[in-house]
Image (cartoon, rainbow, N blue to C red):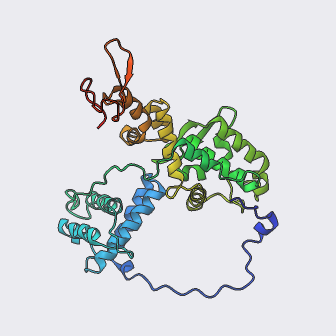
Amino acid sequence: MARTPVPPEKRKKRGLRKKPRAPRTVRAADPSAANGLNAYRKAFIEWAEAAGYASQTTSTRSRALIRFIAWCDERGLDKPADLTRQVLERYQRHLYLYRKADGQPLSLATQQSLLNPLKSFCQWLARENHILYNPASELTIPRVPRQLPKTLLSIADVENLLNQADVSEITGIRDRAILETLYSTGARRAELSRLTLYDLDLGRGTLMIRQGKGRKDRLIPIGQRACAWVEKYLAEVRPLLTVRNDELTLFLTDYGEPFQKNRLGDLVRRYMRHAGIREGACHALRHACATHMLEGGCDIRFIQALLGHSELSTTQIYTQVSIGKLKEIHAATHPAKLERKDGNGASEEYPDDDNEDGGRHQQGGGGIE
């Protein structure tokens, strides 16, 4: 699993090319780029950036609107006045009927992510008096059902996963520290990739998540075992990976660079496959952290603070997958048991069906069918 890190001298030469790169093929210009709606899209994105929206939010909105404008361009729609409720509903039906290259439809979550930016765009057009009214005010967005996580890791599964890292290798120590941190803190993939040396306080056992989802900071605990592995990584591994002295990112790749979100997800996913877990990556450890704490008796509001959920209803999904406590209550309260209480309060087991008289008990609710 673990790999030997690239020597510093090779890392510095990474940008040199032995052969000149072949000339790139000039991509044909997007015909919808000349559409008049693009000017309004750019102004809307600039307004969103000035209003303090996160860069990820603005880029997601921009991509969704580019897709919508390309659809409008094919139908000769090129100005805000062309955007009516009927046009938006036609686009919504287009997304519903659209099929990807593999023949699968767009998920409800994808449809929602493409329509919500359109509603915000139309609302902005009406507020800026580019159109007389908001055509998306009565547009019904498909509701995405709350689904349980696909990968539910038990404590044994997590321990098996953590042991997949070969800690006899340098990068194995780093990978073990990453896995331990994800499981201990429940941090998101993007949050962990942005951690710096100053965000970690090993003495107090705390971790500062800066600009998490919703651009909110939060101070969360990190467990003793995770602290021990991170401390070992900082002492033995990170100095060998560092290329620049001014690099403050906590976890570094083999090239001494900060982890990109996709690369971090691929690393965790690879360990999960070796552990026999078919699906899931970083978010599976986040789910495991919350579920195992809930089964251990933690109040759900503390889990909400740990995960950084703005609404308690988002955290309550873990009450549906925390089966341990439900099984205990079910066993303690449900009357269908393999033993019963006699008149003196003593415990009496039900006999097997093949007892000597061949009959079943008629008292206390009947035997096992």
Residue 209, visible in the rendered structure: no
Q: Residue furthest front?
A: 356
Q: Is residue 273 above or below residue 187?
A: below
Q: Residue furthest top?
A: 344
Q: Residue furthest left?
A: 86
Q: Nearer the viewer, residue 161 or 174?
A: 161
Q: Residue furthest right?
A: 9
Residue sitting at x 47%, y 58%? 56
Where the C terminus falls, by quadrant?
A: top left
110 horizontally vs 127: left or right: right
Q: Is residue 179 above or below residue 98?
A: above
Where the N terminus falls, by quadrant?
A: bottom right
**Res 68 → quadrant:** bottom left
Q: Nearer the viewer, residue 349 or 331?
A: 349
Residue sitting at x 76%, y 59%? 243
Whole-percent x, y for residue 196 in the image: 65, 48
Whole-percent x, y for residue 258 in the image: 65, 57
313 horizontally vs 205: left or right: left
Whole-percent x, y for residue 303 in the image: 47, 36
145 horizontally vs 7: left or right: left
Residue 73, visible in the rendered structure: yes
Residue sitting at x 61%, y 88%? 23
Whole-percent x, y for residue 145 in the image: 31, 52
8 horizontally vs 214: left or right: right
